[in-house]
Amino acid sequence: MSLRHRLYQLLDHRHPSISSKAVDLSIMSLILLNVVAVILESVEELYQRYHLWFDGFELLSVFCFSVEYGLRVWCAVENPSYRDPFGGRLRYMLTPMALVDLLAFLPFYLTMFTSIDTRFLRVLRLIRVFKLTRYSDALDLLMTVIKRESSAFVSAIFVMVIIIIFAASGIYLMEHEAQPQAFGSIPKAIWWATVTLTTVGYGDVVPVTVWGKAFGVLITLAGVGMAAMPAGILASGFSAELQNRREKYRLKLREALADGVISRAEFEALKSTRKELGLEEEEARLLLDEEQSLLRGRDGEQYCPHCRRPIHRPLQGRQFSNST
């Protein structure tokens, strides 16, 4: 095994080795410490007192993130999807996670050539928190759902923008004479329309005329539905994605159970698939029990997992660890 392949396994968060898990834990700890440091640095008294510690920690973090990024680009060709030495590495560098890794340290180097406000630079450093997406199943699931439902989200946002413009125009017609400071133009009225439709309602600007209040009631009711639309899209997307992952795992189970016995290699493959899909152990056990029940049938005879015809051979025990 080459050094590059060993480094690839070490940096692969899905690899089951202890050393790989230790590297993952170290990187996650460094990311979280960076977030805490950025927050504390915004307190000017703390930064002035401990600026040497903060600056030293930032240099150490930039060095670690730079080395990590370089090693990931170098080892990317070990992934079959990026096998080409030049084109493969270039495609990897353009992936979302690789771009996040790059943005984690790039602003620091930009300060050597351009003058950037330190406050703006601190906010940019918070991009490092998105590196946790690689190690969190929950964040990975969220990003998958958002990507999958992106067209629905764009449609919902488009409809919301149209309703905001309609609401701003309507309240402008009814309130611009009574409150020229707040509703003297449609752009000014957009603030009220936005906070009303999103059901935030700061109360800093409110209609005072009868018709304006009546229109405000209608817009508030419409806002309840508009606020629920993205939540509904997200909820249905989560449900569909979880069901899709369960079906993928079910197919792997059927392949492993085709001969009635789950071998050690199949067991490890199923375990890896479960972790990759982000399924809980209990959920995997329930799917296994369900598939075994279907194989046995009510009469206790084993059936083919594909055509469901009896194969006249009893299932040879579970032979499947609960950790799968």
Image (cartoon, rainbow, N blue to C red):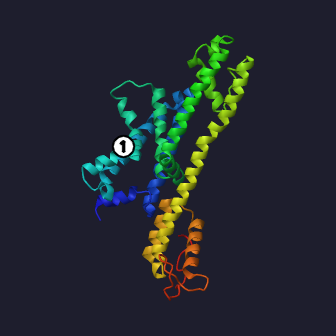
Which residue in the protein does label 1 denote? 66
- Residue 152 seen in the figure: yes
Residue at the (28%, 51%) spot, across then down: 88
Residue 166 x/y as whole percent: 59, 25
Image label count:
1
**Where is residue 159, by image quadrant?**
top right
Residue at the (36%, 43%) spot, across then down: 66
Residue 113 x/y as whole percent: 33, 27
30 vs 8: above or below: above
Residue at the (50%, 82%) spot, across then down: 309
Residue 256 x/y as whole percent: 46, 75
**Residue 253 relative to residue 62: left or right:** right
- Give whichever of 34, 317 is nearer the camera: 317
- The kind of secondary structure element at disc 1 is helix
- Give whichever of 255, 160 is nearer the camera: 160
* Residue type marked 1: Ser
Q: Farthest residue in the right direction?
A: 210
Residue at the (64%, 31%) spot, across then down: 197
- Residue 60 seen in the figure: no
Q: Quadrant of the N terminus?
A: bottom left
Residue 293 x/y as whole percent: 58, 78
Q: Residues within 10 Å of mark 1 (few under 14, many from 20)?
A: some
**Where is residue 83, by image quadrant?**
bottom left
